[in-house]
Image (cartoon, grey):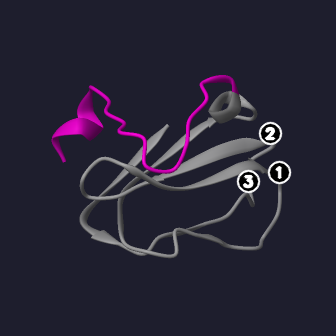
Amino acid sequence: MVFPFVPPRVERMWMKNTHIELDMLFVDAAGRISKITRRAQPLRLNTISSDAPVSAVVELRDGEAARLTLSVGDLVSWTGAAAGR
């Protein structure tokens, strides 16, 4: 799932109603991964912050960031409704 933000902002996510572990990619305005949170724990109320302004958060199934060998600084893109915002 992609959550786009215009304009970019420091974003805080949580896992309150999510029943599976997720990897979260925080994507800056240049389209680069600025932070990766791996295996965010389900049903938690603690906030997971981007720490810096981001233009999107991409949620992946747990372990996908490692499987795809994603790292901070990698360029990401997507197509669809969220891409035009």
Dot 3, how many residues are within 10 Å of its Cα: few (below 14), some (14-19), or many (20+)? few
Is mark 1 in CB contact (under 8 Å) with mark 2?
Answer: yes
Q: Quadrant of residue 61?
A: top right
Q: Horizontally, is 48 left or right of 62 in the view?
A: left
Is residue 78 covered in magenta? yes
Q: Horizontally, is 74 left or right of 23 in the view?
A: left
Residue 71, percent from left and from top: 55, 43
The relative height of residue 12 versus residue 84 in the rendered view (above or below) is: below
Of residues 33 and 54, the one drawn nearer to the viewer in this rendering: 33
Which portion, as a residue range, is magenta? 67-85
**Residue at 67% in and 28% down:** 64
The relative height of residue 17 versus residue 53 in the rendered view (above or below) is: above
Of residues 7 and 66, the one drawn nearer to the viewer in this rendering: 66
**Residue at 19% in and 48% down:** 85
Q: Horizontally, is 22 left or right of 27 in the view?
A: right
Identify residue for label 1.
42
Secondary structure at numbered mark 3: loop
Secondary structure at numbered mark 2: loop
Q: CA distance from mark 1 to mark 3?
A: 8 Å
Q: Nearer the viewer, mark 2 or mark 3?
A: 2
Amino acid carrying label 1: it is Pro
**Residue at 81% in and 43% down:** 19
Identify residue for label 2.
20
Identify residue for label 3.
17
Amino acid carrying label 3: it is Asn
Of residues 73 and 1, the one drawn nearer to the viewer in this rendering: 73
Q: CA distance from mark 1 to mark 2?
A: 5 Å
Q: Horizontally, is 28 left or right of 13 in the view?
A: left
Q: Nearer the viewer, mark 1 or mark 3?
A: 1
Is mark 2 in CB contact (under 8 Å) with mark 3?
Answer: no
Secondary structure at numbered mark 1: loop
